[in-house]
């Protein structure tokens, strides 16, 4: 599958850890509600995907693996899970937007994906939606 015009070197990824979660989180991005995301620093260090950097544009995939949007990183910070604040939790756009909801959801996510610790380091990224892409039927 080719990358959208002008994005041949973009990182391609889907949010979450399942097709359903990828679609759910993508919809929050498209609606303008989700403008941040995070991942375990150890996953980036293990070479799973490149570290985000300010100014880089990435392609967000839907749950079927189709390019759906282009986002641009506007801020990257590294902090412990326990240091994530209400403002960042709200920017993630999930659930009721509270820090409590964010902590519960992300603790469960990290438990499913390699383990959780309150002092684990996270790569916290803020981004802006650059473009919504027209998704093609996979049969085309």
Image (cartoon, rainbow, N blue to C red):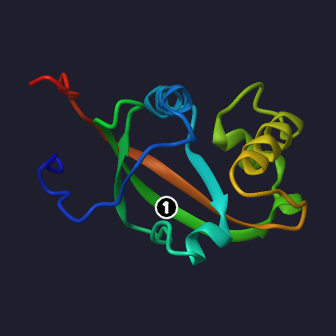
Could you say where residue 82 lies in the image, as x and y percent from the top left?
A: 89, 59
Could you say where residue 107 lies in the image, as x and y percent from the top left?
A: 82, 46
Q: Quadrant of residue 101?
A: top right
Residue tagged 1: 74
Relative placement, left or right, of 1 versus 115 is left
Relative placement, left or right, of 105 versus 139 is right
Nearer to me, 20 or 37: 20
Could you say where residue 95 lies in the image, as x and y percent from the top left?
A: 73, 26
What is the tally of numbered marks visible in this picture?
Answer: 1
Give the residue displayed 23% in from the left and 28% down from the top. Answer: 135
The crowd level at tag 1 (other Cα within 10 Å; few <14, some 14-19, many 20+) is: some
Mark 1: secondary structure: strand
Give the residue displayed 57% in from the left and 41% down from the top. Answer: 16
Could you say where residue 100 lies in the image, as x and y percent from the top left?
A: 89, 37
Relative placement, left or right, of 131 versus 139 is right
Give the residue displayed 45% in from the left and 43% down from the top. Answer: 14
Q: Quadrant of residue 117?
A: bottom right
Nearer to me, 76 or 3: 3
**Residue furthest bottom as drawn:** 45
Relative placement, left or right, of 25 versus 78 is left
Q: Quadrant of the C terminus?
A: top left
Q: Quadrant of residue 83?
A: bottom right
């Amino acid at each position: 599958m080719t990358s959208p015009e002008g994005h041949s070197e973009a990182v391609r990824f889907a949010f979450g850890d399942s097709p359903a979660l990828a679609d759910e989180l993508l919809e929050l991005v498209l609606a303008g509600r989700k403008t941040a995301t995070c991942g375990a620093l150890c996953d980036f260090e293990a070479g799973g995907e490149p570290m985000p950097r300010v100014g880089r544009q990435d392609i967000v995939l839907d749950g079927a693996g189709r390019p759906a949007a282009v986002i641009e990183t506007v801020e990257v910070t590294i902090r412990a899970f326990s240091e994530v604040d209400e403002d960042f939790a709200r920017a993630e756009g999930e659930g009721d937007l509270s820090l409590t909801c964010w902590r519960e959801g992300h603790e469960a996510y990290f438990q499913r994906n390699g383990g959780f610790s309150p002092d684990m380091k996270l790569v916290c990224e803020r981004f802006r939606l650059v473009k919504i892409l027209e998704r093609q039927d996979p049969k085309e």
